[in-house]
Image (spheres, rainbow, N blue to C red):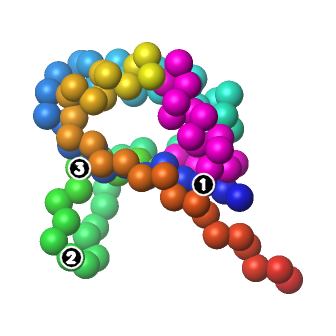
Amino acid sequence: MTAYVIADVQLTGDAEEVEQYRANVLVTLEPYGGRFLVRGGEFQVLEGDWQPGRIVVVEFPSVEAAQAWNDSAAYQEIAPLRIRNTDSKRLLVEGTPGEAN
């Protein structure tokens, strides 16, 4: 079943290090079937008191693939660039199965 990693990322530190992270994260996703569905962009708060930063949504073929990516050596090598320079909130969400026709 499809899974999604959803992040709300606020820059708090070195923008150059965050850019280094962004430049290298795609190659870490590929072995796990991950692909960006949302990577920043304009947004509109429709309800609630939410001041989002940069919204990111990554799709994976399964929860297991998403978790394997998150735990992978390749991702863990670059994750400190994001962790020390942003205030990030991240979720791993299991998708819902499609309706049978």
Query: Along the horizontal axis of the image, is 63 left or right of 97?
Result: left
Residue 73 magenta-drawn? yes
Range of residues picked out in magenta: 58-75
Q: Are marks 2 and 3 in contact (CB under 8 Å)?
A: no
The Cα–Cα distance between marks 2 and 3, rounded to whole angstroms, is 15 Å
Give whichever of discs 2 and 1 has the lower sequence position.
1
Q: Which image quadrant is residue 51 in?
A: bottom left
* Residue at screen point 43% across, 16% down: 77
Give whichever of discs 2 and 3 has the lower sequence position.
2
Give whichever of discs 1 and 3 has the lower sequence position.
1
In terms of secondary structure, where does tag 3 sit? Answer: loop
Position of residue 8 relative to residue 80, above or below, is below
Report which residue position mark 2 lands on.
48
Residue sitting nearer the eye, 15 or 6? 6
Report which residue position mark 3 lands on.
53
Amino acid type shown at disc 2: Gly
